[in-house]
Amino acid sequence: MSEVRTLVIDGKDVAATSDQTVLSAAEENGIHIPTLCHLEGLSDVGACRLCVVEVEGSPKLLAACATRVEEGMKVTTSSERLVAYRRNIVELFFVERNHICAVCVANNHCQLQDQARDLQLTHFELPPLHPELTVDATHERFVLDQNRCILCTRCVRVCDEIEGAHTWDIQGRGANARLVCDLGTPWGSSTTCTSCGKCVQVCPTGALFEKGRTVAEAKSRRPYLPYLVKAKRQGS
Amino acid sequence: MATSTFVGRSAPSDDKRWRQVDVRMRRLGYRPDGLIEVLHTTQEVFGYLDDDALSYVGESLGVPPSKVYGVATFYSHFTLKPQGLHTCVVCTGTACYINGASALLAAISKELGVQPGATTPDGRVSVLKARCLGACSMAPAVVIDGEVHGHAVPARLVDVLEKL
Amino acid sequence: MSTDGPDGSAPVRHGRQPEPLIPDGPARASANVCQAAGCLSMGSDQLFETLRAAVLARGLHDVAVRRVGCLGLCAAGPLVEVPEQGRLFERVHPGEPKRTEDLVSSLAGETVAGRSVAADPFFSHQVKVVLERCGTVDPERLEDYVATGGYEGLSKALTSMTPEEVIAEVVRSGLRGRGGAGYPTGLMWRTVAKAEAPEGKYVVCNADEGDPGAFMDRSVLESCPQQVLEGMAIAGYAVGAHRGYVYVRAEYPLAVKRLSSAIRQAERDGHLGPEIAGTRFNFQVEVRIGAGAFVCGEETALIASIQGGRGTPKPRPPYPASSGLWGCPTLINNVETFANIPSVISRGGDWLNTIGTERSKGTKVFALTGAVTNTGLIEVPMGLTLRQIVFEIGGGLAEGRKFKAVQTGGPSGGCIPESLLDMAVDYETLAAAGSIMGSGGMIVMDDRTCMVDVAKFFMDFCREESCGKCLPCRVGTEEMYRLLDRVTTGMATRSHLAQLEDLAAMVRATSLCGLGQGAPNPVFSTLRYFRGEYLAHIDDHVCQAGVCPVPAGPPAGATEAALAGTATVSSGGRP
Ligand SMILES: Cc1cc2nc3c(=O)[nH]c(=O)nc-3n(C[C@H](O)[C@H](O)[C@H](O)COP(=O)(O)O)c2cc1C
Ligand code: SF4
Ligand code: SF4
Ligand code: SF4
Ligand code: FES
Ligand code: FES
C-alpha cells in the first residue's frame, strides 16, 4: 500500500512511492549516486557509506540506499563535501586491504576499481593496513580471497535471502571483522553451501571468484539476480 | 518471534553438563533469538565454547553455523579457547588508565611474559583486559579469580600472580 | 548463574544471608552498611556480619544493622552511615578492628565519631532524586521501597490518570534522556504511544553502561532496582506496552542478581505481572545480559543483541519508536531516565521542572573519578559549575597536583580545560564546549596526564569497540589511532596532523552510528584546547606530562625523505 511522495533531488522535482528509497528515486530519474554495498534485490544495510547524501533539515548525512523518501524532502546527492568524503571512503577501502589490481582476477571488472576511477583517485596518503589474510581455495569450484574483501556483505545477504543457505556471515568486529564460512571452517567442507554460485555473482570485487574463469566471464551474467528475486517473490 | 522446529539432535557427548544447556534451551522455547543466552549458559558450564558446543546450540535453536560463529566472536565475553587455571583481569577503563593501568599491563607482560588475551605457557594464568569493572573509585582495579583488588601496584600485583 | 565470567566481573554471593537487625520500635541508631559493588569488594558483606554479631553480643536492642545501597563516597569504603547521628564512617575494613570498635561504641551512644555529613560539601551540594533511596533502603527488600513511598507513582498513574495524562506530566517535567543524547523523554513517549502496533509494543531499559569510567547505572540498579522497574511499568502504561526488557552488561552480575530478585518480589506483591494495582493493566519485565560490546548501548544494536544477533547498528530512520524489537514500536530509555519517573508522577512534573536550568531540568548523576580527592557517585542539580563539582564536592586535587582537564561524555565526549571551569554543567553548555553530557562519567585529570595520550586512549577504545559494519569507523578509527600513535612516539609531522584532522571530520560525518560519529570527538576537543601539546610532541619532541615515549633530540621526521614511505604513494596503492 504505497502512496505517492514528491521530493526534490539535486534541484529536480521527483515523484516516488512511499516504499522507495532515495537511491531508487534518484536512479529512476537519471541521477547517479555511487554505491557498493547496495544491490537491487537484496536488503539494504547502509554499510559502505558511499551513497551518503545531504537532506535538508537533517544534521547528519544519510545513506541514500537505506533512507525512504518522504514528502517534501530536499536531497543533494553531490556537493564538494560529499565528493571529498566519497574519495576518502574509497581511499580507506584501498588502504584497508591489499588490492593490487594489476594481479587481481577482477582487474577491470571490479566495482571498487570503478569507483576509484570515477572519483579520479590516483594515489593514497594514509598508511596502508594490509593485514596478510587467507585465501580459501578448498571449494571445488570457487575461491575466497579475504585480501580483496570489502565486507559489503552482499554475499552474506544473497546466500541468506535468496539461496536460503546462510553459509556466510561476519566474524569478529572492528578491524578484525572477516567474512566467515560456517564455523570458521573451510568452504570446501561446508555443510550448508549448495554450490549455487550466487555469492560469486554478486561480489563487487575479486574476493569471490570461480576457479579457472576470469571474473569478467563470471560477472557478465550478473543481471540474473533481479530475475531470481522476482521469481522467488512470485513463487511465494 | 518465530519458534524454530526443534530438530531433536542429541548432545555431543554424554557429559552431564549438557543437561544444563538443554534445560536453558527448553526454557527459552528453542527460540533462535535466545542464542546469546544459551551461549552464556554453555560458557558458564564448560568454561569456553568449542566447535561441538557451537554446532549443537546452533542446530538445536535452528541458527545457521556461520551466524552462531559470528555472534560468538562478536562479543568479547565469549571465548573459544579454554582459559588458564586462574584469571587476572586488568581494567583499562578511563579511570584506571588515568591512574596507571598501563604500568600494570607492562609489568605483567615483562614478568609473566603474557599479553592481554593470552594464557601463560604453563596454562596457569590467563590475562584479560576489561573496559571498566565499575570499580573506578578504586582505580586502578584488577580482578584476580573473581576478587577485586583496588589501587593495584605493579610490583605487588606481579607478586600476587606469581604466588597463585 | 556463574560467579565470575572471563571478563572478571566481581563475584556474587548466593544463598541465604543473615537477616538485617531491625528493632521492634524506632531505632535509636542504625548502622547502614553499604552493599554496592565498590564497598562489597572491600569486604562490606563481612563487615555487615561482624557488626550484626557485635550489636547482638552487646545486647543493643534498639540499634538496627541494615544493608543499604551505594553511599556515594566509594573510594573511602567500606562505608557505614549512621543517619540518626548524621555520621559517615569511612574505611571500616574488616581487617582493622579498631574502626569497627569505634563504630560500635558510637552506635551504643558512648562516643561520637565518624565524618559529619551535614557540613560536608561532598553531601551538601547534592540534590537527590534518582539516588533518593540509594543508601537508605535495602536493595533486596521490596518492603523498604514501598515503605518510602515506592510504587505510589505507578498506582497513581494506573488508578487516576490516563496514559496521555502520564505523558503530559513527563513532558511538563522537562526530563531529557540521561543515556547520552538528551532527547526529551516525554516527546519520545508520545511518539511510541501514537505508533500503530498490531503486534504489541516494548519498553526497554538501557543498562549497558559502556562508557569506561562510569558506574552510575550500576549503582542505581544495585542500590534501588525497584525504582527503575516502577519507572518502566509507568512507561509501559503510558505508551501501551505490556512487556519490558532490561539489557544489563555482563560485567555487572550483582546488578543482574538484584534486579532479578526485585522482579520476583514485585511480581509476588502485584506491582508487576497481571492486574497491577487492581486494574486491568499488566506488565512483565525480563532481564537480558549483554556479552561485552560497547556498541550495544546504541539503540539499534541493543535491539539486535536482545534478538540474539551480532550487535551491529542499523541506519535510522526507521527509529525504534516506530520499528524496534521484532519490528514493533519500542521505547528505549536509560536506567537513570526511568529512575526519575516515579517522582515525576508522584510529585508532579512541575516539581522536577523547578530543579535545574532553563533547558536542562532536574538532576544528573555523575561518577566522579580520576585525580580528585572524593571519588564516588554524586547527584547534582543541572547547572552547577564544573568548579563546584570538582573543587567543592570532589574536594579538589591531591596535594601538590595541578588541575588540567575534566573529561565528560566518555569515548564520544571531550576534555574541558581549566579556563572553562566556571561553566554550568548542562546539555547545551557542554555541547558548546565541544563535549557532551554523556551518561555521566566525569574524570578529573592533572598535570601528569598527556592530552595526546588521552585522545589516543579513547581512539584505542573506539577501534576495539567498532562493530566493523561501516567502513569509515572500521578503518577510520584504526587509521586515526595510528596517526595519534605517531604523534606520541615522535614520528609525526604537521602533515600527519592535517591528515588526522581531515580524517576525523570525515569519520564524524559519514559513519553509520553514534560510535563512529562520536569517535573523533576526543581528538577534536583535545586539539581545540591543547593543540600546543600536540605541537610540542611533533615539533620539539616533548611530552610535557612525561607520559609519551618521544625520543629526545631533533625530530626524526625532520627530513622530508623520512616520510616518503607513508605520506606519498604507497606501494601497490595505485588503483
Ligand atoms: C555507541 C553508543 C553507546 C551508547 N551507550 C549507551 C549506554 O551505555 N547507556 C545508555 O543508556 N545509552 C547509551 N547510548 C544512547 C542510546 O542509544 C539511547 O540514546 C539511549 O539509551 C536513549 O535513552 P535516554 O533517552 O533515556 O537517554 C549509546 C549510544 C551510542 C551511539
Ligand atoms: S555458492 Fe551459493 S550456497 Fe554456497 S556460499 Fe555461495 S551463495 Fe551460498
Ligand atoms: S566476499 Fe565480496 S561480496 Fe562478500 S563481503 Fe567480501 S567483497 Fe562483499
Ligand atoms: S559507526 Fe562504527 S560501531 Fe557504528 S555501525 Fe559503523 S562500524 Fe559499527
Ligand atoms: S550503497 Fe548505501 S551505504 Fe553502501
Ligand atoms: S575504569 Fe577501571 S573500574 Fe572503571
Image (cartoon, helix red, strand yellow):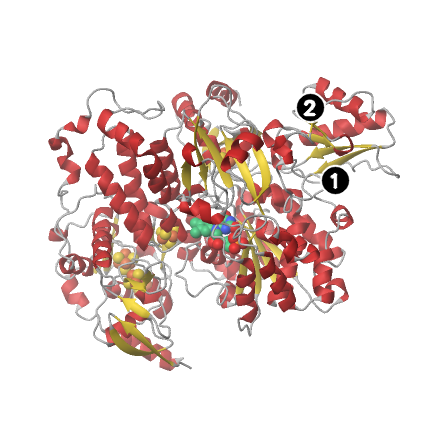
The residue singled out by tag 2 in the image is C94
Quadrant of the image containing the N terminus of chain C: top right
- Percent position (x, y) of residue C553? 21, 20
- Percent position (x, y) of residue C89? 69, 26
Residue C481 is marked as: none
Quarter of the image for residue C152 reads bottom right
Seen in the image, is B98 located left or right of residue C74? left
- Percent position (x, y) of residue A32? 21, 69
Q: Mark 2 or mark 1, which is nearer the start of the sequence?
A: 1
Identify the residue shown where x is 22% and y is 71%: A31
Quick one: SS at disc 2? loop
Q: Quadrant of ligand 2?
A: bottom left
The residue singled out by tag 1 in the image is C16
Q: Is residue C143 above or below residue C321?
A: above
Choose between A131 and A44: the one closer to the eye: A44
Identify the residue shown where x is 21% and y is 43%: A126
